[in-house]
Amino acid sequence: MIARLRGVLLEKDPPRLVLDVGGVGYELWAPMGTCAALPGVGSELTLHTYLYLRPETVQLYGFLTSAERELFSMLLSVSGVGPRSALALLSSLSPAELCARIASSDVEALRRVPGIGRKTAERLVVELRDRLETGSWPGSPPAREPLVQEAVRALMALGQGRREAERAVSAALRSASDGVESLEELIRLALRQPL
């Protein structure tokens, strides 16, 4: 597998790039954020790569960091998500935003990405939510604290669905300008939130 390439940027036609490595021009496809962050044509750079091999196609994808490459790989592990959809997700949302949307079960935000329908958005949430908890990506909001997790579990025990409970707890935390001191206070505030 080709995991990393270092060379001179020959062409930059987002999302398509051509990188000259030792006289060989490698064609790569990259998220729009990666393309925007790259230096100009003629500059030397290093890209972390993902080689997509299928009987009908061989494509190379480039990323600024190995973490972005790992996120791309995780997206491909979801049933019905191919490289085009994964690239669209990473081009429409920053990695931190994408992780936050999946972790918070924000299906509507995922559906706004071109080529992502309701079923695919729901599969992304179901299959990746536990692997992409909020805070798992640099620049994303802090991870859910035990207090928050306990509050969600308590609301679920009272009959709310996971998504409803997570939304109510998030809204409660936003409404508490001075912060929340106890589990009881967080649950009380969450129960007051409109569903």
Image: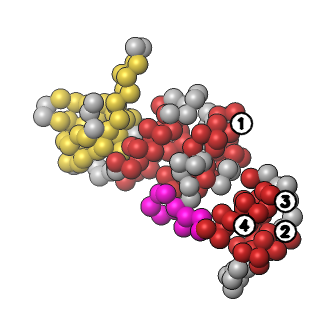
The spot of residue 15 in percent (x, y) is: 42, 38
In depth, the one of 155 and 117 nearer the eye is 155
What x and y, as percent, mark residue 38? 33, 50
The residue pinned by badge 3 equals 158
Q: Which residues are magenta?
A: 135-145
| Residue at disc 2, secondary structure | helix
Q: Secondary structure at mark 3?
A: loop
Q: Amino acid at mark 4?
A: Ala
Q: SS for tag 4?
A: helix
Image quadrant holding the C terminus, namely: bottom right
Residue indicated by mark 1 = 118
Query: Residue drawn at (84%, 68%), measured in percent from left and top?
Result: 191
User: Of callouts 2 and 3, which one flags the residue occurring earlier in the amino acid sequence?
Assistant: 3
- Are the residues flagged by discs 1 and 2 in contact, CB closer than 8 Å? no
Name the residue beneath numbered marker 4.
Answer: 151
Q: Nearer the viewer, mark 1 or mark 2?
A: 2
Tell me if label 2 and label 4 are in contact, CB under 8 Å.
no
Marks 1 and 2, Cα distance to the nearest angstrom?
A: 28 Å
Q: CA distance from mark 1 to mark 3?
A: 28 Å
In whole angstroms, how far apart are the C-alphas of marks 3 and 4? 11 Å
Residue at the disc numbered 2? 191
Residue at 41% over, 44% down: 70
Asked if residue 43 is positioned above or below residue 146 in the image, the reply reads: above
Which mark is in front, 2 or 4?
Answer: 4
